[in-house]
Amino acid sequence: MDKKKVEKLIHELLAELGENTDREGIRDTPKRLPAVYEEIFWGMNKTVEDVVKKTFSVDKNDVIIEKNIHFYSMCEHDLLPFFGQVHVAYIPNNKVLGFGDVIKIVDLFSKRLQIQERMTSEICDGISEFINCQGIMVIIKARHLCMEMKGAKKENTEIITRAVRGSFEKNPDLRKEILELMNI
């Protein structure tokens, strides 16, 4: 990202919106935003391999659940935040991720311009492909400021998306058991 170019664009946007760009509270905003955007969008053009460096071998392939992983993302349609929780359950294939690595994968896909439906699938496929697990389920529950601040203007509306692969996809009883374990 060309920080100077972004700074100039933000300055022009503020002026175009009718803001006094010399006003005390606004004066430094164009200088701050490039660093803010770098942080918010750090997952752009990165892969799971960029953030996860190792896996761990296991003898048993028991279900692993990691839930209530908080995330913040930006809606690609309105450039407004959406945020919530990600829940991941998977059955390994003799290889597991560290718990922190699951969080890194969630951050990777949430820290880019996104839609919740795609993000759910990307997290699911990213984990599944990286460790070749037997089955995986990813559920995301989120609030979208694009629905709360504009348009429908309905506060606290939650959107729930789910992606399922492998043995969870093929076995409805297993899916039900996992949903009960997740308390969802």
Image: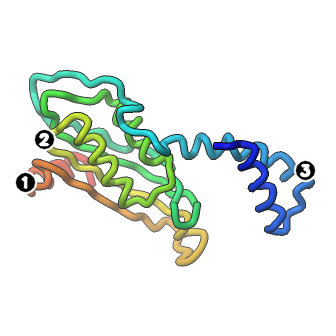
Task: Tell me which corner region of the image, top left, top right, bottom left or bottom right, holds residue 106.
Answer: top left
The relative height of residue 158 versus residue 55 in the rendered view (above or below) is below
The structure residue drawn at horizontal position 28% and vertical position 50%, both measured from the top left corner, is: 138
Q: Given the image, on which type of amino acid does mark 2 rest?
A: Gln
Labelled disc at residue 171: 1
Labelled disc at residue 24: 3
Q: Which of marks 3 and 2 is in front?
A: 2
Give how far apart the Cα atoms at labels 1 and 2 are.
12 Å
Q: Position of residue 102 (x, y in %)?
A: 34, 36
Q: Which of 83 and 109 is in front in this view?
A: 109
The structure residue drawn at horizontal position 36% and vertical position 37%, both measured from the top left corner, is: 48
Query: Going from the N terminus, do you reach mark 3 or mark 2 first?
Result: 3
Q: Given the image, on which type of amino acid does mark 1 rest?
A: Asn
Q: Where is residue 98 in the image (x, y as percent from the top left)?
A: 31, 27
Q: Circle 2 is placed at which residue position?
A: 134
Query: Going from the N terminus, do you reach mark 1 or mark 3 first?
Result: 3
The structure residue drawn at horizontal position 84% and vertical position 53%, both measured from the top left corner, is: 26
Q: Given the image, on which type of amino acid does mark 3 rest?
A: Glu
Element on which disc 1 rests: loop
Which residue reaches farthest bottom? 152
Tag count in the figure?
3
The relative height of residue 154 versus residue 182 in the rendered view (above or below) is below
Q: Where is residue 119 in the image (x, y as percent from the top left)?
A: 38, 53
Element on which disc 2 rests: loop
Q: Residues within 10 Å of mark 2 (few under 14, many from 20)?
A: some
Query: Going from the N terminus, do you reach mark 1 or mark 2 first?
Result: 2
The relative height of residue 97 versus residue 182 in the rendered view (above or below) is above
Element on which disc 3 rests: helix
The structure residue drawn at horizontal position 51% and vertical position 55%, both measured from the top left corner, is: 113
Q: Nearer the viewer, mark 1 or mark 2?
A: 2
